[in-house]
Amino acid sequence: MSDVVRRGDVVHRAAGPWTPTIHRLLDHLHAHGITWVPRPLGLDEDGREVLSYLPGVVPSYPMPPWVWSSLLLVEAGTRLAELHRATAGFNRAGAVWQIPAHQPAEVVCLNDVAPYNMVFDDAHRLCGVIDLDTASPDPRVWDLAYLAYRLVPLTQVGDTGAGALPLTERRERLQQLGQAYARAGDCAEIGAREILSTAIERLVDLAEFTARRAEGGASQVAAHVQIYRDDAGWVERHLPSLGGG
């Protein structure tokens, strides 16, 4: 959604008022063992942020078949839980966030954790997560619900690459994801009902946020507004079949 330039082993991209906070967060994550996110390297002569480049493959829609493996689903849930655990002690004093926080602010969520922001090695193993600039404090289920939306997936859109997965399989994948997150996060499992109801709320919130961005000049995101609204309705209609009834 912004101009990004790679120069060798570093990436330059537009900065904002939130950039110092996100750079502090990235430093905090590295200090707590989360080394598979970019390392902040300050600003360049044009005021753009500079980040370390994470080598690998970043997939895009329609996603390749390997994105929908159970192994990757578990890996993604595990990495998200590890990242959330590492953010629990982050000093939020004076923090500036691009995305408004939501209560209870249990952890710092990425707000856009999805396959298109993941880096994979040649064996299709998850080896990095990028684009943390929309992070903000939120309940942990806020991120988990969006990951479920993107990776179960919880969408009626036909171009994801997942094909026409039956609702029973999506229900099983949702359970797998929740269990993987709970194991790695050393926390109680977040049930399907809570994940699904949060996914609906998350999509409605995202539609409104995206509509404001489109009205502000980001015309390239305008088409996403109705998609998010339609998908929120799809999840709501299928709550019982997905395990949330």
Image: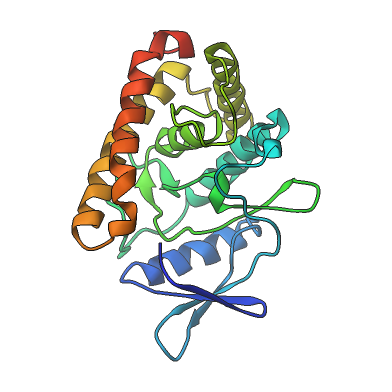
Tally of numbered discs: 0
Q: Is residue 99 above or below residue 74?
A: below
Q: Nearer the viewer, residue 242 or 175?
A: 242
Q: Picture quarter containing residue 135?
A: bottom left
Residue 21, percent from left and from top:
39, 66
Residue 134, percent from left and from top:
39, 56
Q: Is residue 158 above or below residue 219?
A: above
Protein image colouring: rainbow
Q: Nearer the viewer, residue 242 or 50?
A: 242
Is residue 90 left or right of 115 when viewed as pictured? Answer: left
Q: Picture quarter containing residue 57?
A: bottom right
Residue 225, percent from left and from top:
29, 42
Which residue is depicted at the point 58% across and 35% down?
185
What is the quadrant of the N terminus in the image? bottom left
Which residue is depicted at the point 59% across and 27% down?
163
What is the quadrant of the C terminus in the image? top left
Q: Is residue 113 above or below residue 165?
A: below
Q: Is residue 225 above or below residue 29?
A: above
Is residue 161 left or right of 109 when viewed as pictured? Answer: right
Which residue is depicted at the point 45% across and 50% down?
110
Which residue is depicted at the point 70% across and 64% down?
55
Residue 31, percent from left and from top:
60, 62
The furthest residue to the bottom: 45
